[in-house]
Amino acid sequence: MRSMKEAGLGDFPYGIVGGVNRGFSREVWERRLEELLEFRRREGHLNVPRGRLATWVANQRRLIGAGEVDEHRVRLLHDAGVSWEGLAARREMQQAAWDRMYGALRTLKRSTGHLNATEPRLAAWMATQRFLRKAGTLSPDRQVKLDALEFPWTRPPAPVPERNTRAQAWERSVQALREYKAAHGDCAVPARWPGDRKLAQWVSHQRTLRKHGRLAPQRIEQLDRLGFVWSGESAARDRRWDDRFNALKRHGHQPLQDPALIAWVWRQRNDRRRGVLRPDRLRRLESIRFDWAPVESRAQRRKKTWETMFAALKKTRWPNRRLERWIAAQRRLHQKGRLSRDRQRRLEEAGVSWTSREQKWEAKFADLEAWRRSHGDCNVPMAAEKGGALARWISAQRADYKSGRLSEERISRLDAIGFIWEAAPHLLLVPSSR
C-alpha cells in the first residue's frame, strides 16, 4: 500500500501524493463515510442495496484492490465494518440479508394471514422485489419462494387522502414542527432528515417563501414565536458539532475507537491548519486540551521514512524515480538550511551531491580519471573518438581557472591527477597516440 501525503496524512519528504481516491474530494469522501455510518446505525448492516452510496462503497473496494486508497481511509472503512472480501463472499452476505427479510415476510403471513407490511424496512424490501421482477432481474428461485407466500406483485392502491385546505395542511406541518422541537430542543430540521422528509421539505419551503417575500407576515410571526431557524442547516450543523465535541470530552484522552469521531477529530485539525476553524470552536477545543498535532508520532513516521529511503539509496546503484524525487527533496532542504548536519554528512558519504551542476562536474571528473587510467595522462584531444565532450569540459575548467571561477577544492583535485592547465596546440587536432 503506497503512503499518502494529503491534508496532513503521511509525511513523505518530497511530497509524493499516492493512493488518491480519484474523483472524490476530502469533503465528499467524509460525507459518504458519514452516510455509510448512518446507514449502519439505521439498518443494522452495511449491505447497501443500490444507489449513490452503494456505488461509492463499490468504488472503495475497487480502489483498495488497486492500492489507490491511503492507509488512514482504509482504517476508517475497516473500523466502520466494511468487508473487503471477494465477490462470492459479498453475494453470500446479500443472500443472507435476503433470507432474513424473506423470513420476516413469512412470519408476517403466518401471524396475520396477509402481506400488508407496515414496518418500513420490510415494506421497502417488498417494493424492491416488485421492481426487480418488473425489470426481469429477480432470480427464478426467489420468485418461486415469494409466489409460495402469495406475494402481492401489484402494488396496493394508495389510500385516497381526505380533502383538506392548504391552511389545514400548513397547521399540520406546524404541529409536526412543534413535536420535532419537543424532541430535539430546536426547530433546525436538517434538509435531508430521514425521520420525516415531508417536514424537512416543508421547513425548507418556508425559508424559500420568506426569501422571495411570498410568506404571509402572520405565518412568519407564528414561526418566529416557535423559534423557527431561518438560516437553513447552520443550527443543525452546530448541533452535530456539539454532539461530537461532547462525545470527545466524555472520551477523555483514551485511544479513539469510533470511526466517525476519529474522522471528526482529524477534520478539526485540518480546519485549524487551513485557518477555517471558527474561533469559538477553537477556544472550546483548547479548553479540553485538544491534541492539535501529535508531533512525536508524526516525527517518528518522518524519521522512519527517511531511514527507509536512505537505506534504499545505499543499496541502489541506479536510483528509480521515487528515490530521485527523495534526493531532490533532500537537496531543497539543504539549500534552505533545514537539513540536519548528521543527515547532510551521511548523504555526502553516500555520494549525494547537493546541486545538479555539481553532479555533472563529478561525472566528468570521473570520466577524466578513467581516461587517465587508460591513456596515462589528462590530454584529451578534441578529435579523439568519443572524447569531444570530455575535451570541451577540460577547456571549460581551464577557462574557469584563468577567470578565477574554479574553486580551490576542484583545482586541488585536478592537480592530484596531473591535470595540464595549458593545452598543447597539437592536442586540438591530433588524437592521442596512447
Image: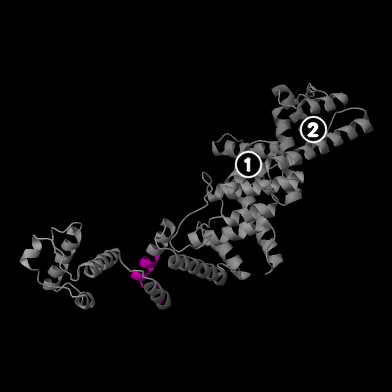
Segment tinted magenta in the rendering: 329-340
User: What's the residue at 75%, 27% (across, down)?
Assistant: 139
Residue carrying label 1: 58
Q: Position of residue 88 (x, y in %)?
A: 71, 40
Residue 242: where, in percent of width, then height? 65, 58
Is residue 238 shown to the viewer in this render? Answer: no
Dot 1: few (<14), some (14–19), or many (≥20) neighbours within 10 Å? some
Question: How many dots with numbers?
Answer: 2
Residue 123's disc is: 2
Let me know if residue 338 is in the magenta part: yes
Q: Which percent across, then down, holds residue 321?
A: 41, 56
Residue at point 52% right, 50% down? 20
Q: Quadrant of residue 141?
A: top right
Which circle's residue, 2 or 1, is located before the other in the chain?
1
The quadrant in which the N terminus is found is: bottom right
Q: Is residue 374 visible?
A: yes
Viewer-side residue, 434 vs 134: 434
Identify the image quadrant of residue 298: bottom right
